[in-house]
Amino acid sequence: MYFFPFYNPLFLGSLIILVPGIIAGVYAQHKVKSTYAKYAKVEAASGLTGAQAGRQLLDRAGLSDVTVEEIPGSLTDNYDPRTRVLRLSQGVARGRSLAALGVAAHETGHALQDAGGYAPMRIRSTLVPAAQFGSNFGWIIFIMGMIISSFRPLMTVGIVIFTAAVIFQIITLPVELDASSRAMKMLQSDGIVVAGEADGARQVLRAAALTYIAAALMSILMLVRMLILSRES
């Protein structure tokens, strides 16, 4: 016997649960893009590029073995703890703006977390495979359990798998917030941004943090929706 959830009132009605997450996500994306665009036009007095600032901060922290690379794309910046490479998008690597310096310092903050054995970052790294699988297939497996009545246990399996993605998103919050906190301290202590410029870099980092908060909220709401549907099916 087959059950088509897409025509079920509860399945469709439960979509309203996701509305706050959708609104938060749209706002966060708008905020980070507009804030970055604003401060990408404000050049820092230090005259350093994002790549130069990242290299300077890494060397001051005794992390000369961490490589700084330029990568294509916009706001594709990241730090890879497996290869110990700090990757900066072209706009950040070559930019001399408060936005570029803020992003570069943030990624450098992740390098410092890695070197110092920051617990939340270590936990997040171990969850990456499970989180990726859960995010990609948790909902699919759950739907399969709804569609085919004899496969109802798959709904529980889907929930368990998707929970790994939710935990990952929650743990990501302290990791990102701590990296931003480290970034601001480094930028100011090294004189890369002066007192009057610090707020601009801080605004960029705060806007970026909203995207992680929105992602965590959306994943939690998705899980709540799955739990409601599993109890009513």
Image (spheres, helix red, strand yellow):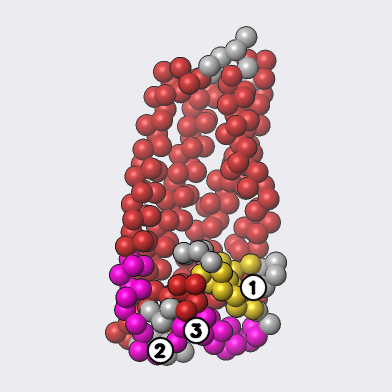
Q: Which residues are magenta?
A: 35-64
Hey, what amino acid is under mark 1? Val
Asked whether residue 159 appears in the rendered view, the answer is: no
State which quarter of the image contains the N terminus: top right
State the residue position of label 3: 53
Residue 55 figure quarter: bottom right
User: Mark on residue 9?
Assistant: none
Apparent side of residue 80 relative to residue 44 in the rendered image (left or right): right
How would you rate the neighbour count of disc 3 (Cα within 10 Å): few for under 14, some for 14-19, many for 20 or more?
A: many
Is residue 189 part of the magenta span, yes or no?
A: no
Measuring from the top left, give residue 97's x and y in whole percent: 38, 79
Asked whether residue 63 appears in the rendered view, the answer is: yes
- Residue at 67 percent across and 47 percent down: it is 130
Q: Of 147 and 42, which appears nearest the observer?
A: 42
State the residue position of label 1: 85
Hey, what amino acid is under mark 3? Ala
Hey, what amino acid is under mark 2? Gly
Measuring from the top left, give residue 31's x and y in whole percent: 33, 59
Apparent side of residue 129 relative to residue 206 in the rendered image (left or right): right
Measuring from the top left, give residue 212's x and y in whole percent: 46, 56
Are discs 1 and 3 less than 8 Å apart at CB? Answer: no
State the residue position of label 2: 47
Q: N-terminal of the two: label 2 or label 1?
A: 2
Element under label 2? loop
Q: CA distance from mark 2 to mark 3?
A: 10 Å
- Residue at 70 percent across and 70 percent down: it is 83
Q: Is residue 31 above or below residue 224?
A: below
